[in-house]
Image (cartoon, helix red, strand yellow):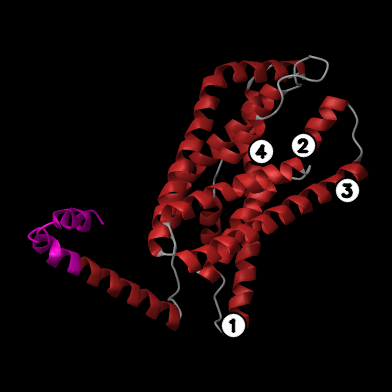
């Protein structure tokens, strides 16, 4: 999108320069995100091993790492978004190897879920406030293009949504094939799943926050002070594709999931699942037994409430 905006602002475009710049910007962003995250996580792990792990500090560092990677990449002229993505992926891999406390993981997940929910809500609220004006501007752009009927907007939205779903279906199918081949190399043959599973994974992955945030970041005016061309149309199409994707997923997913038939799990995975269920049942039974007795211990009345809420 950066190159499209630059072309609209300057009025010139070179494919060779765009490709070279894209490779440099992308590679630089990924590298900065990886290096920054690996260095910070290693330092954090050393501090935890030496002085103990503080949950609040761990959560704060996990929040600051993506922002730091984004700012450094942006200052360096690279992709801040890819740096943040690389930071998230690197954090997951490094912490799986180093290990963190279960309490840290649980609290951090709750914090991140809250932030994600709040950020998504803010983006869609901003869209809702602007949508009536954006719809009118998009209709004007369509009329200027020679289409007298505003119904063309719905045709554009449907065509783009179908294209996005088709690309996502192909991508998920490729990933499933690669996972099947990897399992076969490990000696655990896996039957190729039904197309319904691929379709369900395609529809279940519907997102829209990043798309909306990107399209809403388009500049309002060009360098000469005139309005950015077709900005309202771009925002309307992005919002329409997201809404249509959500509606399609809401209608089709229950039917697809109801018709799925899963093959039995391999021996090791089945044993692991049984062990997890047994541990969970034992924990729930222990909480039920101690629910009434903990409150009778002097000074420990709050533990009963915490046990019931866990």
SS type, badge 3: helix
Mark positioned earlier in the residue sequence (1 or 4): 4
118 horizontally vs 83: left or right:
left
The residue indicated by pointer 2 is 2
Residue 242 seen in the figure: yes
Who's the residue at 55% across and 41% down the image?
245
- Seen as rendered, the residue at the extreme bottom is 187
Q: From the viewer's perspective, is the residue at label 3 or at label 4 nearer?
A: 3
Q: Is residue 20 above or below residue 161?
A: below
Query: Label 4: how many residues lie within 10 Å, few (<14), some (14-19) or many (20+)?
Result: some
Query: Label 2: how many residues lie within 10 Å, few (<14), some (14-19) or many (20+)?
Result: few
Mark positioned earlier in the residue sequence (3 or 1): 3
Q: Splitting the image into 4 quarters, where does residue 180 fall?
A: bottom right
Mark positioned earlier in the residue sequence (2 or 4): 2
SS type, badge 1: loop
Q: From the viewer's perspective, is the residue at label 2 or at label 1 nearer?
A: 2
Mark positioned earlier in the residue sequence (3 or 4): 3
Residue 300 lies within the magenta run: yes
Magenta stretch secondary structure, dominant: helix
Query: Label 3: how many residues lie within 10 Å, few (<14), some (14-19) or many (20+)?
Result: few
Q: Splitting the image into 4 quarters, where does residue 310 fall?
A: bottom left
Mark identifier at residue 186: 1
SS type, badge 4: helix
Query: Label 1: how many residues lie within 10 Å, few (<14), some (14-19) or many (20+)?
Result: few
3D distance between C-alphas at marks 1 and 4: 39 Å
190 horizontally vs 38: left or right:
left
Magenta highlight range: 285-310
In the image shown, does 80 or 204 lie closer to the viewer? Answer: 80
3D distance between C-alphas at marks 2 and 4: 20 Å
The residue indicated by pointer 3 is 20
Mark identifier at residue 160: 4
- CB under 8 Å between discs 2 and 3: no
């Amino acid at each position: 999108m950066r190159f499209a905006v630059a072309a609209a602002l300057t009025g010139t475009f070179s494919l060779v320069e765009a490709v070279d710049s894209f490779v440099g910007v992308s590679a630089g962003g990924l590298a900065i995100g990886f290096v920054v995250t690996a260095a910070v996580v290693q330092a954090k792990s050393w501090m935890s091993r030496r002085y103990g792990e503080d949950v609040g500090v761990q959560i704060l560092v996990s929040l600051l790492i993506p922002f730091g990677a984004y700012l450094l990449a942006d200052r360096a002229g690279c992709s801040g978004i890819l740096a943040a993505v690389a930071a998230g992926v690197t954090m997951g891999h490094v912490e799986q190897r180093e290990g963190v406390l279960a309490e840290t993981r649980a609290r951090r997940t709750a914090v991140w879920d809250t932030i994600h929910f709040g950020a998504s809500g803010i983006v869609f609220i901003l869209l809702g406030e602007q949508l009536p004006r954006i719809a009118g501007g998009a209709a004007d752009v369509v009329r200027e293009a020679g289409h007298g009927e505003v119904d063309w907007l719905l045709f554009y939205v449907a065509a783009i949504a179908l294209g996005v779903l088709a690309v996502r279906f192909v991508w998920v199918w490729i990933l499933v094939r690669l996972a099947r081949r990897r399992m076969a190399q490990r000696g655990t043959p896996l039957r190729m799943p039904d197309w319904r599973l691929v379709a369900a994974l395609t529809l279940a992955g519907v997102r829209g926050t990043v798309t909306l945030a990107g399209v809403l970041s388009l500049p309002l005016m060009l360098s000469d002070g005139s309005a950015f061309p077709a900005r309202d149309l771009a925002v309307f199409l992005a919002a329409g594709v997201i809404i249509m994707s959500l509606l399609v997923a809401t209608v089709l997913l229950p039917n697809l999931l109801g018709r799925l038939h899963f093959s039995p799990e391999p021996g090791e995975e089945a044993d692991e699942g049984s062990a997890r269920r047994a541990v969970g049942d034992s924990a729930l039974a222990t909480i039920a037994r101690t629910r009434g007795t903990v409150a009778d211990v002097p000074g420990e009345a709050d533990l009963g409430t915490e046990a019931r809420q866990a």
